[in-house]
Structures are given as structure tokens and as C-alpha cells.
Amino acid sequence: MLTVENLTKVFGQVRAVDALTFEVRPGMVTGFLGPNGAGKSTTMRMMLGLDRPTAGTATINGLPYRDLDHPLRQVGALLDASWIHPNRSARSHLRWMAASNGIPRRRVDEVLDTVGLSTVATKRAGGFSLGMKQRLGLAGAMLGDPHTLLFDEPVNGLDPEGIVWIRGFMRSLAAQGRTVLVSSHLLTEMSLTADHLVVIGQGKLIADCSVAEFTSRAASSVRVRSPQLPDLHRVLAEAGLRVTPGMAPDGRPVLDVADAVTDQVGDIAAHAGIALHELTGTGASLEEVFMTMTAGAVQYHGGGPAGPAAQGGPR
Ligand SMILES: Nc1ncnc2c1ncn2[C@@H]1O[C@H](COP(=O)(O)OP(=O)(O)OP(=O)(O)O)[C@@H](O)[C@H]1O
């Protein structure tokens, strides 16, 4: 169990993490979601004792990271796969990690096998593809057979095959009863991987709920067709709904009703004695929900010069 209470980190003028409180429970994958610059990496770094909180606490099974006995046996993390020594082989890299953490040598070949790197164990890690480096990073995280795992944007830059593999890997860790926290700025990705979501924007908690709950908060719209369209338009508008005349793909006139659900529109029509020939709800896409809920919390808007450059900005 990972617990964050009132966790805050201020860098100069920036409140990178702002009074965050949440728990990450075992036996499921928890997605840590937020736009670029939301404070996900800083939160994870504080959980791992790499950054000191300005206020609040982050604990792992009740203890701050620095007070854990044999931390690698309790927590594994993949923050940045690129720090591997380029001239070391995968096996010697892991042997060095194992030796410096009192982990038996035989564990190295076990984790290489778990991540599918046994056949390239003696190859220079510097020649590895990003996907292979990610796997080596995961092998390192698994060395101490920890109960708690933290992954920061593990699918960034991976090809589709690598993404599917990592998703399956994280799900299998959760199925073994481990606590798995994985960060991403992509809701679609998280909806395919996570059971639960902790969503942040500008360092603040936006949502802490299941993926299904998060998406059900979506503003949905309703498309409606009727032989009495002008009357229907009038009664819906009188009920305070935002109605826009539109056209169905087959060219027939329809009304689009914003921020409404089908029950509501159907009831209003029935009450006014208006016949309906079509009543269709259109849920917002996951990305739309995410953008709506984090609107105002986005620091870097894509597209402009500040977008991609800022994403790789200073830590
Ligand atoms: N060492 C630092 N010094 C100054 N500001 C920092 C530092 N580390 C992070 N920040 C700022 O804190 C905010 C949160 O950054 P953080 O990297 O935690 O966000 P993130 O959600 O992980 O985003 P990304 O996906 O882009 O890494 C940003 O405004 C960032 O510029």
C-alpha cells in the first residue's frame, strides 16, 4: 500500500505538487494520470525519497522510503530507462545492482527471463532499442521481488508490440497481489491498463475513482429526430437545454442536445406529447472527458512551440 497525505512540493514559484492525498491499493493497477507538467514525476520521486516534500508525507506500507529495510526488496521503480551504463551487458548491469543491494546473483537470470531478455543477456545495453532498455529497467525494478512497483510513463516511445507487452506485464504483477502505480498523460492508454485512476492537474487531485466512474462523469450529448422538430426544439430549449439543429448522415434533420442524457430528452418529449423517431446518446470519448476535467489545469498546450519542448523541460 502506498499512501500520500497532504503531499506538497514547491520549486521556487511553482507548486508542482499541491496537498495531494490518496492511497494506492494492492492487487490492481492504479493509473496516475495528468497532463504534462501536472506533477506526476515529482510525486513519484517523493514516494521514492528522491525529492524531499515541502510538506506532507509519502509512505510505503506505513514507512517513508528512507526508513525501509532493504528498499529494493519492497519497492521497484522504473523512472527513466536511459541511465543504464552503455558498455555494460544486461546481465552485468543487473549483477551490479543485485550485489550492491544484497540480492542473490541467481535472481538476475530469473528477472532477465521474466522480461524476455535472456537471449541478449550478454549484449551491451548501449546497443539496446528503447523497448529493450525498458525491459531491462523493469528487470531491475523486479530484482528484489518487491511488493510495490512504480512506473513513470513506461510506454512512452514504445512500438505497439512493446506497449501490449508492458500492459500485460503490469496487469500480471497486479494479479499477483502487488501494488502497481503507473503514470501516463494518455487516458486511452490508462483505460486499457488500469483498474483505478488517480487524476491530477497542476499538482492537485482531480479524481480518485475507477476508470468506469471517471468516464461516466463525461458530458454526453443526445441526437434526436422527430416529425415535430420545431415543437421539440422549443420544449427542450424551454427546459433549459442547449439545442442545435443538425443533420443525420442520411440527410434527415435532427436536433443535437448538449450535456444531456437520453432519459431526460425522452421524458421531456413524452410530457409534451411529441413523437420521437430516433433518440441516440453519444458519450464523450475518454480523451474528451480528460480534457474537460483537466481544463485549466493544462500547463503546456500542444501544437505551439511551448508544447513538445516544454515536455522535456527541466526537472
Ligand atoms: N527540479 C525542478 N525544479 C524546478 N521545477 C521543477 C523541477 N521538477 C519539476 N518541476 C516543475 O514542476 C512541475 C511538475 O513537473 P513533473 O515533471 O512532476 O510533471 P509530470 O506530470 O511528471 O509531467 P511530465 O509528464 O511532463 O514529466 C512542472 O511545472 C515542472 O516544470
Image (cartoon, helix red, strand yellow):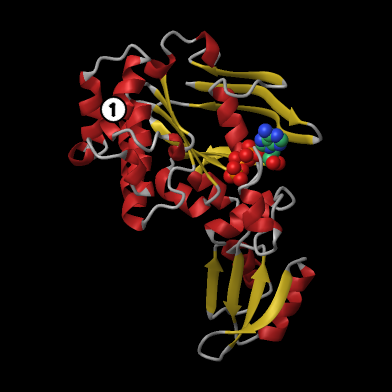
Outermost residue, right side = 13
Across and down, in percent, residue 304 comes to: 70, 63
- Left or right of 275, for residue 90: left
Across and down, in percent, residue 200 comes to: 63, 40
Q: Which residue type carries mark 1?
A: Ser
Q: Quadrant of ligand 1?
A: top right
In-front residue for pair 233/88? 88
Q: In this view, does 267 lie above or below 49?
A: below
In-front residue for pair 194/185? 185
User: Which corner quadrant of the image does residue 14 belong to?
Assistant: top right
x 33%, y 46%: residue: 127
At label 1, counting other C-alpha atoms closer than 10 Å, the crowd grade (few under 14, some 14-19, many 20 or more) is some
Outermost residue, bottom side = 251
**Residue 202 visible in this rendered orientation of the protein:** no
Number of numbered markers: 1
In-front residue for pair 72/119? 119
Across and down, in percent, residue 190 comes to: 47, 47
Outermost residue, front side = 87
- Left or right of 142, for residue 303: right
SS at badge 1: helix
x 37%, y 56%: residue: 159
Across and down, in percent, residue 267 comes to: 62, 66
**Residue 262 visible in this rendered orientation of the protein:** yes
Residue wearing tag 1? 92
Quadrant of the rendering where the C terminus is positioned:
top right
Q: In this view, does 182 lie above or below 62?
A: below
x 32%, y 33%: residue: 88
In-front residue for pair 27/86? 86
Q: In this view, does 80 lie above or below 61?
A: below
x 76%, y 72%: residue: 237
- Left or right of 110, for residue 81: right
